[in-house]
Image: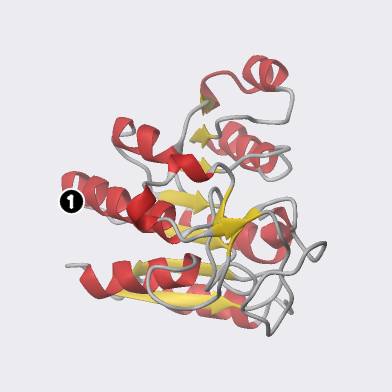
C-alpha cells in the first residue's frame, strides 16, 4: 500500500480530510507511520488492525499518543467494535471471504452512522484480484476456502508452480471462478449493496481500488488523482 502513498493516498486524504481512519494490514508499518503522522498533524484518529504488526509498536504508542489505536486481532473480529470511520484502507488477508465480509461490516457501520467511508484497497489486480490467498487458511471457514498449497503463481497460468512467485503463501490452486479473489469480492459486494457505489481502479503494483458512493462529490477528484498519478 505504501507504494501508492505520494501519488494517490496522500492526495486523496488531503481532499477528503478524514478524521477517523482504519488501516487493515500494517505489516512493517511503512504506510501506518504516514497515516499516524497525518493523524498527529490533522487531529485524526488512526485505528490500526493487524494480528502481528512488525514495527515498533511501543514507540508508536508513545510518540503518537491518542492518535494511535492498535488492535492485534483479525479484522473481522475488530471492525464491529469501531463505531465510526470516514476512510478505511484494506490490505490484510487477500481472499474473497475476508474482503467481502470486511466490506459488509463497513456497510453496517455506514448504516448506523449515516455515512459510507472512502474505501481504499490493494491487490485488486494480478495475482490476487481473481485468486484467493490465505495467510492462515484455518481462519477462513472451510465452505468459503478453496483448495490451496504453498506453491507459487505464474502470470497467465491458473495452476500453481513450485518455487514461483509467492510460493511461501497459501495460494488457491486455481484462478478465476466464483468467490475467488479480492476484486471478485468487491464486485459481489457492490452487486448486493443497497447504496449505489462507484469503483475506481488502478492496475499497477498489483492493483489499487477506491470505492465510494456514486453521489460523492469526491468522485471527479478521485478520477483526476488516479488518471494523473502516472502509475
* Nearer-the-camera pick, 171 or 100: 171
Disc 1, SS = helix
Q: Is residue 147 left or right of residue 216?
A: right
* Nearer-the-camera pick, 125 or 48: 125
Q: Residue at x 59, y 64 (%)?
A: 123
As drawn, 93 above or below 172: above
* Badge count: 1
Mark 1 closeness class: few <14, some 14–19, many ≥20 residues within 10 Å: few
Task: Give the residue number, with chain letter if any, for mark 1.
Answer: 111
Q: Residue at x 67, y 21 (%)?
A: 57
As drawn, 142 above or below 20: below
Q: Residue at x 47, y 71 (%)?
A: 183
Q: Position of residue 192 (x, y in %)?
A: 22, 70
Please state, as top left, top right, bottom left or bottom right, where the C terminus lies in the image.
Answer: bottom right
Q: Position of residue 105 (x, y in %)?
A: 29, 48
Which quarter of the picture shows residue 112?
Answer: top left
Please state, as top left, top right, bottom left or bottom right, where the N terminus lies in the image.
Answer: bottom right
Q: Position of residue 133 (x, y in %)?
A: 57, 57
Q: Is residue 171 left or right of residue 78?
A: right
* Nearer-the-camera pick, 54 or 220: 54
* Nearer-the-camera pick, 130 or 167: 167
Q: Is residue 8 left or right of residue 111?
A: right
Q: Position of residue 20 (x, y in %)?
A: 43, 40
Query: In this rendering, does residue 82 appear at all?
Result: yes
Applied colour scheme:
secondary structure
Query: In this rendering, does residue 117 appear at all?
Result: no
Q: Is residue 111 left or right of residue 183?
A: left
Q: Residue at x 49, y 58 (%)?
A: 95
Amino acid at each position: 500500500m505504501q507504494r501508492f502513498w505520494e501519488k494517490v493516498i496522500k492526495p486523496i486524504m488531503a481532499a477528503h480530510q478524514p478524521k477517523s481512519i482504519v488501516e487493515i494490514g500494517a505489516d512493517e508499518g511503512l504506510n501506518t507511520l504516514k497515516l499516524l503522522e497525518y493523524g498527529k498533524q490533522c487531529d485524526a484518529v488512526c485505528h490500526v488492525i493487524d494480528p502481528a504488526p512488525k514495527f515498533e509498536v511501543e514507540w508508536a504508542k508513545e510518540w503518537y499518543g491518542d492518535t494511535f489505536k492498535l488492535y492485534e486481532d483479525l479484522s473481522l473480529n475488530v471492525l464491529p467494535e469501531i463505531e465510526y470511520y470516514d476512510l478505511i484502507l484494506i490490505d490484510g488477508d487477500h481472499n474473497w471471504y475476508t474482503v467481502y465480509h470486511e466490506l459488509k461490516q463497513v456497510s453496517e457501520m455506514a448504516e448506523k452512522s449515516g455515512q459510507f467511508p472512502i474505501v481504499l484497497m490493494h491487490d485488486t489486480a494480478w495475482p490476487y484480484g481473481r485468486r484467493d490467498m490465505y495467510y492462515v487458511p484455518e481462519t477462513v471457514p472451510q465452505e468459503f476456502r478453496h483448495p490451496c498449497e504453498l506453491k507459487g503463481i505464474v502470470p497467465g497460468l491458473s495452476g500453481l508452480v513450485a518455487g514461483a512467485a509467492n510460493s511461501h503463501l497459501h495460494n488457491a490452486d486455481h484462478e478465476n471462478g466464483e468467490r475467488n479473489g479480492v476484486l471478485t469480492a468487491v464486485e459481489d459486494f457492490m452487486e448486493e449493496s443497497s447504496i449505489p457505489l462507484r469503483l475506481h481502479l488502478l492496475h499497477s503494483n498489483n492493483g489499487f481500488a477506491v470505492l465510494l458512493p456514486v453521489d460523492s462529490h469526491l468522485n471527479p477528484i478521485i478520477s483526476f488523482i488516479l488518471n494523473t498519478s502516472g502509475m
